[in-house]
Structures are given as C-alpha cells and as structure tokens.
C-alpha cells in the first residue's frame, strides 16, 4: 500500500484520539517500517491491519468499524485533493460507476506500482447500483466507508447492503439502493 494511505490513517488517529494513541499503536504493532512512512513509499497492507488492530484494542472499537470510519475520513481528504474528478459527476451513482476508469486511472498515473482493488459495476438502474469489490487486501469495510462518504457528498440517501461472495472478504457485492 502507498505510504500516503498510512500517513492519512495516522493523521486521522491523531485528530480523533491524540498523539499518545498514535505512539501507542505504532510501538505495539511490531512494524517492519517501524511506523515511519513516506507518502510515496510502499508498505505491506499487513502493517495497516496491525495498526488498526492495535487501535481497536486500545479504544475498544471493532476493526471493521475502524476501517469503515477510515474510509469515510479518507474520502474527504482525497476529495479535496482531487476535486475536479468528483465535480465531473452529477450524482453518487455516476461517480461510483466510474471509479475504475477515472479515479483508479489517475491513481495509477501518480503511483504506477499501486495495487488497487477492482471495482466492477455488475448492474445499474436509476434506483440501484451493484458494485463488485475484489481485493486480496480484504478491506471491504474501508471500501464501504468510501461508498458511504461518497453518498453523503452527493446528499444521496441510498442504503448500502453487502454480500460476502468469499468468506475471507476478498470479494464483496455492494448493493446501493436509492431510498427516495
């Protein structure tokens, strides 16, 4: 994973829980990087799971909820950095349907070695969008947080349901249903 993802995570933790918690999770995670990240560096996704696991133990919030919250947070951060990519879409369904051929294309231009999840549109109507998430990193809770933040950004009241197509969460079908 790109270091930028780690840097933003640690910044979120510091904002929400303070520097002492950041220091605690880094010191107790036994990280090959020693918790020293550069935004352009590449690090094992296992380090993110170690950090989130330590945070979960420290503050007693489940790992899945922390990944979800981080997805919500990072959409705002990246949304500010890539405003033009978001502004070019009329609504959340349009944006989410184009993640693979807009957002991921731009990320790969900046970071050619990035290993991104695959987001495939399985079906789409005016009221319903099905996205197939596939990733060996198994961070579907993070992806769901990103989706929810996107819906919030566009003031879309749709609901999200998940169906785990593989038990290890490496393949998940997100169904986004308009509630209006």
Image: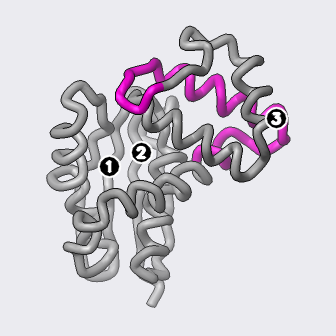
Q: Nearer the viewer, residue 38 or 89?
A: 38
Query: Which numbered disc, 2 or 1, marks the residue that appears first in the sequence?
Result: 1
Q: Nearer the viewer, residue 64 or 31?
A: 31
Q: Which residues are magenta?
A: 38-67
Instruction: Please check the rendered image and state whether residue 104 is part of the magenta-colored stretch, yes or no.
Output: no
Q: Marks 3/1: CA distance?
A: 38 Å
In the picture, the disc for residue 172 is 2
Which residue lies under the disc numbered 1?
Answer: 132
Which residue lies under the disc numbered 3?
Answer: 20
Pinpoint residue 73: horizontal percent, then vertical percent. Answer: 55, 56
Mark 3 crowd level (few <14, some 14–19, many ≥20, 10 Å Cα):
few
Quarter of the image for the C terminus: give it.
bottom left
Q: Is residue 21 above or below residue 177?
A: above
In the picture, the disc for residue 180 is none
Pinpoint residue 68: horizontal percent, then vertical percent. Answer: 58, 51
Left or right, 168 with respect to 57, comes to: left
Q: Marks 3/2: CA distance?
A: 35 Å
Mark 2 crowd level (few <14, some 14–19, many ≥20, 10 Å Cα):
many
Q: Residue at x 31, y 68 (%)?
A: 129
Quarter of the image for the N terminus: give it.
top left
Query: Which numbered disc, 3 or 1, marks the residue that appears first in the sequence?
Result: 3
Left or right, 133 with respect to 161, comes to: left
Q: Is residue 148 above or below residue 133?
A: below
Say if mark 2 contacts mark 1, CB within 8 Å: yes
Q: Marks 2/1: CA distance?
A: 6 Å
Q: Is residue 159 above or below residue 180?
A: above
Q: Nearer the viewer, residue 105 or 23?
A: 23
Query: Which numbered disc, 3 or 2, marks the residue that appears first in the sequence?
Result: 3
Q: Nearer the viewer, residue 81 or 75?
A: 81
Q: Residue at x 53, y 43 (%)?
A: 8
């Amino acid at each position: 994973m790109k270091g930028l993802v780690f840097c933003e995570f640690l910044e979120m933790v510091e904002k929400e829980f303070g520097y002492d918690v950041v220091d605690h999770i880094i010191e107790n995670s036994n990280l090959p990087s020693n918790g020293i990240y550069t935004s352009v560096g590449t690090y094992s996704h296992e380090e993110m799971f170690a950090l989130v696991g330590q945070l979960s133990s420290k503050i007693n919030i489940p790992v899945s909820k922390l990944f979800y919250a981080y997805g919500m947070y990072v959409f705002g951060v990246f949304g500010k950095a890539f405003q033009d990519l978001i502004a070019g879409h009329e609504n959340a369904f349009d944006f989410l349907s184009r993640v693979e051929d807009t957002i991921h294309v731009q990320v790969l231009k900046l970071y050619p070695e990035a290993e991104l999840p695959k987001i495939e549109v399985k079906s789409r109507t005016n009221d319903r969008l099905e996205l197939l998430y596939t990733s060996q990193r198994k961070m579907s809770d993070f992806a769901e947080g990103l989706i929810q933040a996107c819906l919030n950004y566009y003031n879309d009241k749709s609901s999200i349901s998940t169906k785990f197509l593989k038990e290890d969460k490496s393949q998940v079908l997100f169904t986004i249903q308009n509630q209006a």
